[in-house]
Image: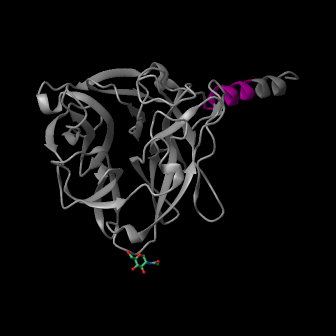
Amino acid sequence: MHFARPLIAFFLALVTFSSAATYSNPLKTKDGSDPHIAWSGGYYYLMTTTWSNLQITRAKTLNGLKTGETKVVWTDSTSSRCCNVWAPELHYFDGAWYIYYTAGNSANLDGQRPHVLKGGATPWDSFSYLAQLTNTWGIDGSILRFSSWGNYFVYSCFSGSLQSLCIAPLISPGQIGTSKVLSTPTQSWEKVGNPVMEGPAAMYHGGKTFLAYSASYCWTSSYSLGLLTWNGSGDPASSSSWSKTGPFLTSANGNYGPGHNGFFQSPDGSQIWNVYHATSNSGGACDGTRYTMGQIVNWNSDGSPNFGSPAKLGTSLTGPAGE
Ligand SMILES: *[C@@H]1O[C@H](CO)[C@@H](O)[C@H](O)[C@H]1NC(C)=O
């Protein structure tokens, strides 16, 4: 019996060691652009821009996404939405999952429009085409939810020559109301290369509503996150109800142009995580060489999010709580 206690301690140490969730970046090396993750029913579901189709990768751990099960869930031969398939995101409404994505024609990027597919009770069910959401140029559509105001569709649009953020009430998952310009790129850090606001991503924490987005042109190392914070009472479709701060999550540790992010919850619901892309090219990148990074969102004492810095690739990091 004299060896029992050290043995128990040894096995406890083993169990502790093997259950500690760690991961490292990148989560996806090729075609890791414009990532979005939804956590549901024991799986992380990752979608990224793969240009010619829509694919979902799923795994039970964040690190497992590197070798996760992957399937093509959509290809389309309709000429107006066959090609330049970008920025897919999974969102859930009333018992069904939907994929919001951008697509256009093969000739150029002038035909880029937001589209939506309808799926089933889990993200792994099959999808069918539901609707095109605008008749004007629009990319990177996402969903913004309010308990008091209902749901909105937010996307990147043109306001004159400025690539800006637009907002419209979401009447149903496949139909939006009148669009308004929510915010235009006015800050110096939003205008490097080209004035750009794109890739909006909503986040809710401590009673506050935030809308992160990506600023500046992707072929620069200045591509980074900006943040709109709702004032808590004004009409969400009115730009005066939001204040702008940034830049956040700027180039660091060999990762350039981090941005086009999505937010997801840890499996235990206690943490908000950020998934985004970056490139090892010091001049930035807009192509499929961008890789997918995951990182926890921390919080400042004033309740604002702290996005931190992209860690050097390969660094072992603590995974989401509840894995
Ligand atoms: C929020 O913004 C609206 C304008 O959209 C303004 O009327 C309202 O007073 C603001 N509320 C607060 C708490 O700042």
Assign ligand 1 to one image quadrant.
bottom left
Q: Is residue 314 above or below residue 206?
A: above
Give the percent coordinates (x, y) of residue 310.
61, 36
Report the quarter where the N terminus lies: top right
Residue at the right extreme, as displayed:
2
Residue 144 appears in the figure: yes
- Single out the residue that lies furthest toward the left: 78
**Residue 321 visible at all:** no
- 273 lies left or right of 109: right
User: x and y percent of residue 251 in the render?
Assistant: 60, 37
Residue 152 is drawn in which quadrant? bottom left
Position of residue 119 measured from the top left corner of the image (x, y, whole percent) = 21, 38
Whether 144 is among the magenta residues is: no
77 horizontally vs 180: left or right? left
Q: x%, y% of residue 280?
A: 56, 25
- Magenta residues, start to end: 11-22
Q: Could you say which is closer to the camera, residue 44 or residue 164? A: 164
Q: Is 13 contained in the magenta span?
A: yes
In the image, taking residue 319 as reference, residue 58 lies left or right, namely left
Q: Magenta-highlighted stretch: main secondary structure?
A: helix
